[in-house]
Amino acid sequence: MSRPLILITNDDGYRAPGLLALRAAVADLGDVMVVAPDRERSACGQGITIKGPLTVEKIDDTTYAVDGTPADCVILALASMLKTMPSVVLSGINRGANLGDDVYYSGTVGGAREAAFWGLPAGACSLVTRGKPIDFTESAKHSRRLCEILLSAPPAPGVLLNLNVPDGNASEINGVKVTRQGMRGHASGVSITKDSRGRTFYWIAEPFDKWDAADGDDMGAIRAGYVSITPLGKDTTSHPDIDPLARLLKGTAGA
């Protein structure tokens, strides 16, 4: 019986410690292939490159670096580079949270979502930390468990599993919760600087950590010291608004 093929990507680059920790954690679960960006591509979402060509550098027989986004990496791997489709696609381990609204900006989630769009079992893995030094030990353990779940009981096609692990050792983690996507009450800040020639530069800062944590959502779980696993689907329609909007349009027709 052939071993499962596990495709790994990320948005921190193929040399990132989080990716290396993930690779080591799942190495005995199957044959691992890494196709990841050649440098950091954080906050690129599910963006793809269509205005120019991409290049691929072979690092070794199972590692390839792409001058593109995580979604680019997944597309290249699935459409061109791999001889067979992977059994599972993992993205991460990201250095930092991907909670609530983060999932729309995250390259980590974007890579996993691209794989889910292809109908493959996919997971995004993140460690909720900003501290140094960063220890991926617990996030790697939980990422391995996520991989096992995706291999044995994958979600419906088009659904990805978004894993966030709180920073800390095993004794500081209270367990695992399946959660819904939360909402982050934030606004990105803008920092304005000038260089020696008087030119103005605008820096979009990371969103402020103002969490609208609630019972049952991903941010509430992390705040309470739990690992969060959130199933994320393709459909972003606001279904409760369909009928009211249709009635409104019907009422204004011909006005």
Image: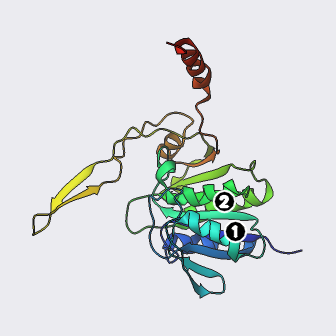
Relative side of 142 to 151, left or right: left
Q: Position of residue 54 (x, y in %)?
A: 54, 75
- Quadrant location of residue 8? bottom right
Say if residue 26 shows up in the picture.
no
Badge 1 or badge 2: first in the primary sequence: 1
Task: Using a 10 Å C-alpha cutoff, classify the residue at mark 1 as few (fewer than 14 neighbours), some (14 to 19) or many (20 or more).
Answer: some
Q: Position of residue 222 (x, y in %)?
A: 50, 46
Asked if labels 2 and 1 touch by Cβ distance under 8 angstroms, the answer is: yes
Q: Residue at x 60, y 35 (%)?
A: 237
Q: In the rendered image of this protein, does residue 1 appear above or below residue 221? A: below
Q: Residue at x 50, y 75 (%)?
A: 67
Q: Nearer the viewer, residue 48 or 222?
A: 48
Relative side of 150 to 233, left or right: right
Residue matched to label 2? 115
Residue matched to label 1? 78
> Real-space Cα distance between discs 1 and 2?
8 Å
